[in-house]
Amino acid sequence: MIHTNRQRARMCLLCLLLLMARPIKKARGERIKVMTYNVENLFDTMHDEGKNDYEFLPEGANEWTRERYLRKLRNVGEVISDVGGVGWPLLVGLVEVENEVVMDDLLHSTPLGARGYEYAITHSPDERGIDVALLYIKDLFCPDKIEEFQVKFPHSPNTHSRNILHVHGRLFNGVPLHVMVVHLPSRREGKRVSDLKRQDVVSQLQAKCDSILHHDPGASILVMGDFNTTPRDPITHIWAHPLASRRTAYRTDLMYDLTSLVPSGVIPGSYRYRGVWQQIDRIVASGSMLLPDNPITYLWESARSVMMRRWMQMDADGELSPKRTYGGHFYIGGVSDHLPVVAEFVLARKEEL
């Protein structure tokens, strides 16, 4: 749902009026949740012209029926609701969604629509037709600029991948926030070839973030999604710096990976491959969001992967793993082979800004 300039202007004016009318009773210490989730091939049951989505049709190899599709939508909606707990996640970056039809169905067939979520989605040249999207609660976050950037691969100019989604808006306390949702290339072609492609995407992410910080030093920026690399991977390490400790003097002109420091006693990753947990779904923030006096501040060690319900789990090699939707073409019925990743932030009240 990429709005026209006139639609965005009307939408932003309405949002600002709502935000101004909304009573600000909450003091510093209020927490909001941000979530990213790879929902593993969330396709509708119809063919998109020019896209290789044939496996996910009723007559396709996966026998992707309306019943299976609706079940997956309900499961995704329930995961988002559960992650929020009492307070629903304010922002949700979704990876591997096919199109606006899927997003509309997600809102209309689950409680997400009634809660007041709206969305922005990319229109990527990806061969399979998958995109990234951002869900946001419209009375708590007001977008004023929604854009997408097509990823370029100098080493492989004929490669098509998922675009980068960039949404700029204001939180209900008036704080401006940049949000980007990404899905970097997978390792299907082998590590050496795919490393170059992921490096190309990271270079473009770095350029986008550097540009924002150059024009607005200390800007609050969140980048989230499936990086297909871990925080220790050199590809992203030079841009998304690892966290050290609370007392570290973090720089406002750099980006930091909130998922690089996993709290003890939690699941050590978002994706389990050949028995090894990997933190490839990640949330990266600008350094200003690590400073205690920033209007929006990261709640230390809150970033984590979450597996709440038993129906999200399956036994794989004697250990619990995310219950995926398919194993090959065999229907398992799970919601995703990834876990959702959540991080919490503390907001300043309006009077403090």
Image (tube, grey):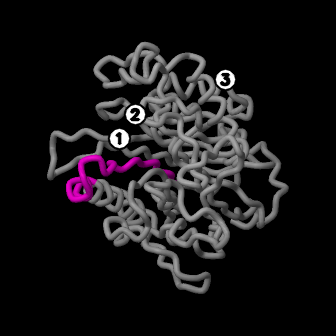
- Asked whether, in this view, residue 298 is left or right of residue 167, the answer is right
Earlier sequence position, callout 1 versus callout 3: 3
Q: Hey, what amino acid is under mark 3? A: Ser
Residue 184 covered by magenta stretch: yes
At a point 60% along the width and 51% down the height, the residue shown is 35
Q: Quadrant of residue 117?
A: top right
**x%, y% of residue 120?**
51, 36
- What are the residue bounds of the magenta stretch? 178-197
- At x 73%, y 30%, the residue is 111
Residue at image location 65% in from the left, 65% down from the top: 266
Find the distance from the CA under tag 2 to the CA under tag 1: 7 Å
Near mark 2 (Cα within 10 A), the count class, few <14, some 14-19 or many ≥20, is: many
State the mark number for residue 162. Answer: 1
To which residue does mark 2 refer? Answer: 130
Question: 10 Å neighbourhood of mark 3: few (<14), some, or many (≥20)?
Answer: some
**Which residue corresponds to mark 3?**
109
Pick the residue in front: 74 or 323. 323
For label 2, the SS is loop
Q: Secondary structure at mark 1?
A: loop
Of 219 and 340, nearer the camera is 340
| The C terminus sits in image quarter | bottom right
Residue 169 belongs to magenta span: no
Amino acid type for the residue under numbered disc 2: Ile
Q: Measured from the top left, where is residue 222 in percent x and y?
A: 51, 58
Residue 31 x/y as whole percent: 73, 60
In whole angstroms, how far apart are the C-alphas of marks 2 and 3?
A: 20 Å
